[in-house]
Image: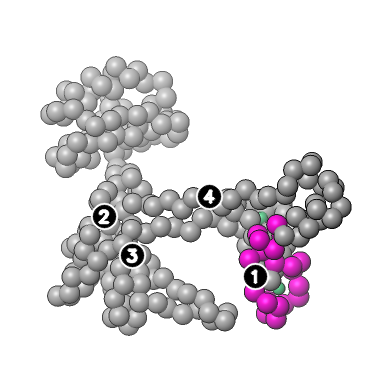
Amino acid sequence: MKYSRDNETFTKVSPFVIKRFFSCYLKGDLKSVKKLRDGTVLIETADDLQSEKLLGIKMFSELPVTVEPHRTLSSSKGVVSHFDFLHLDAETISEEMASQGVTGCRKITSRRNGEIKITTSVILTFAMETLPSRVFIGYESVPVRPFIPSPMRCFQCQRFCHIAARCEGKVYCLRCGKDKHDGDKCAEEARCIRVFKMVLRFLDWTIRGDTSVGGKAPIDPPPPPRVSSQ
Ligand SMILES: [Zn+2]
Ligand SMILES: [Zn+2]
């Protein structure tokens, strides 16, 4: 829930007033109500009836407000594979499966020898917190696997947790891990850049002693754990 006018926020609104408002407006207790740093209020309802009533709220303390479902907390993502997905576009799949709670579809592609290929798998977004265990593709019941996004990786320095637009590192070749060379086609043997760099730095450390890493064995921080987005 947020105020409709840009200059109004919930930051200074008393939590007692918020509680009084909802207890008058709704039957039963809400699961949780939290004021967020951006000046909006995050409300977790106990059932669909409460959600429906909340979406109808237009005013709070005589000021216009907007209530909308949370974009990520109220949805889930799952991977579904089916041979027929090869011949159907994402929009058609999403439209045909809307009655099963599907609100979005993205095709999973794979890159082999520099060529991008469409796979039989898609990532479906469902308008529900709990991922369904199966969906129907026509008459066929197909399992849904939780979608686990890849960790954020920079395609400039090949490290994790930032993107190339915010990178202050050196540019390395994505394929061989050496300094970036001319052209996109790399003829070198493919290898993991993180392991390659670690071995180089470790050799430097053992041969020349403490040179650049403050006496500690040079070990990169591990990539962040993969988190399920359901
Ligand atoms: Zn980077
Ligand atoms: Zn290369």
Q: Nearer the viewer, mark 2 or mark 4?
A: 4
Residue picked out by circle 2? 131
Would residue 195 be counted in the magenta stretch? yes
Amino acid at dot 3: Val
Q: Amino acid at mark 2?
A: Leu
| Name of the residue lying farthest toward the front | 206
Res. 88 image quadrant: bottom left
Q: Nearer the viewer, residue 193 or 53?
A: 193
| Comes first in the chain, label 1 or label 3 | 3
Q: Which mark is residue 174?
A: none
Label placed on residue 79: 3
Comparing 176 with 54, the one in front is 176
Real-space Cα separation, disc 1 to disc 3, in angstroms: 28 Å
Q: Which residue, given by chain and number where applicable, does mark 4 sit on?
A: 224
Looking at marks 4 and 1 on the same chain, the residue that comes earlier in the sequence is marked by 1
Inter-mark Cα distance, 2 to 3 = 10 Å
Q: Nearer the viewer, mark 2 or mark 1?
A: 1
What amino acid is found at the position of numbered circle 4 in the picture?
A: Pro
Q: Which residue is mark 1?
A: 191
Q: Which residues are magenta?
A: 177-198
CA gap, disc 2 to disc 4? Answer: 24 Å
Give the residue at x 72% y 54%.
169
On screen, residue 62 versus residue 225, left or right, reads: left
Instruction: Give the residue drawn at x 33%, y 64%.
Output: 79
Given residues 43 and 13, the one toward you in this image is 43
Residue at the right extreme of this rendering: 208
Relative horizontal placement of residue 79, taking residue 153 as reference (left or right): left
